[in-house]
Image (cartoon, helix red, strand yellow):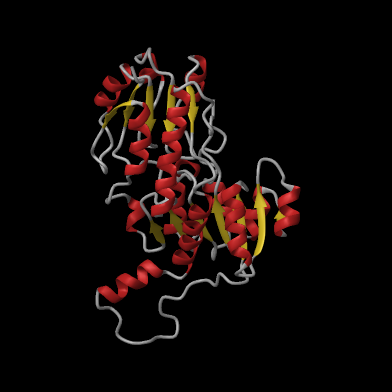
Amino acid sequence: MKPRVFVTRALPEEAMNILQEHLQCRIWEEADIPVPRDVLLKEAKAADGLYTLLTEKVDEELLSLSPRLKVIANMAVGYDNIDIAAARKRGIVVTNTPGVLNETTADLTFALMMATARRLVEAAEFVKQGNWKTWSPMQLTGPDIYGATLGVIGMGRIGEAVVRRAKGFDMNIMYYNRNRKPEAEQELGIVYASMDELLQQSDFVVVLTPLTPETRHLIGARELSMMKPSAVLINTSRGPVVDEQALYDALRQKTIWAAGLDVFEQEPIGPDHPLLQLENLVALPHIGSASIATRRKMAVMAAENLVSALTGKEPPNRVV
């Protein structure tokens, strides 16, 4: 009998074909609605494997109720939705989908930086609402990107991809990372700096660090106060890396110029959230990897991880 798995969202056809060839699949068919918690717990209890998204919380409660569970295949690079220690304790394999989304997420990061600096969302609404009456010298102006100083917090593969794009804009680039990267410095012409130095000197601060206990609220009131009043903050990593209340205060008080966020502490963010009332914030619905090709590749990669782990093979992208 084929191993039984629960797939927590409707997937592209090519990914489903891989799963259904080798596994007995139960599927939450709603593409745009997360599986309810009670349904997830019920299905996990009888499953040998789970195919999860970031929207699914795989915690001690779920794992303790799932005696058959052998593998969790997460369709994401990050896996902060999974209790890794609890999975390791039970010998449950956890996989992710690294590498495939680096360039796509870097594209979005740079696009968000440009949209925020040049006030593109605000300008588009300005036109749609009939407010464009004439050309005016300082109307909807923002900071230049070309030749500015970029500070990257978290120099992983996505960070390096962002840097390559920034080089085309002749930006001066510094970075902060838990571990210094001499090879990247030599290859990309970037300068290592302390966090404080980076915050004080950068015109654009891009946050690309994974969410860990150490990085939760890594950017808070103290860090924001160190930035230039003309600086722009971009977060395309995980929402809780930035203290949203502190960011709201900094944007409202014009401590910094603007911010662009693709991720939030609670997702989806409610339309009445105070941050969304600010004109100097560009907010996106966690679309960093949302190109058609990349999402399909991620779906297939997660499917291959799940099949491998449940058919006696070593999964290509094992976390634990």
Q: What residue lies at 31% left-to-right and 33% top-to-bottom?
A: 8
Q: Please indicate, yes or no, whether residue 299 appears anywhere in the rendered image.
A: yes
- For the image, the number of numbered tags is 0
Rendered-image quadrant of the N terminus: top left
In the picture provided, is 133 more to the left or to the right than 222?
A: left
Q: Nearer the viewer, residue 157 or 15?
A: 15
Rendered-image quadrant of the C terminus: top right
Q: Please indicate, yes or no, whether residue 190 appears anywhere in the rendered image.
A: no
Q: What x and y, as percent, mark residue 312?
A: 49, 21
In the picture provided, is 7 more to the left or to the right than 165?
A: left
Query: Which quadrant holds residue 74?
Result: top left
Query: Which quadrant holds residue 51?
Result: top left
Q: What x and y, as percent, mark residue 216?
A: 51, 38
Q: Is residue 252 above or below residue 68?
A: below
Q: Nearer the viewer, residue 131 or 90?
A: 90
Q: What residue lies at 55% left-to-right and 38% top-to-bottom?
A: 215
In the picture provided, is 176 more to the left or to the right than 318?
A: right
Q: What residue lies at 39% left-to-right and 37% top-to-bottom?
A: 54
Q: What residue lies at 28% left-to-right and 39% top-to-bottom?
A: 10
Q: Is residue 267 above or below residue 189?
A: above
Q: What x and y, as percent, mark residue 268?
A: 32, 44
Q: Nearer the viewer, residue 234 or 287?
A: 287
Q: What x and y, as percent, mark residue 187?
A: 73, 56
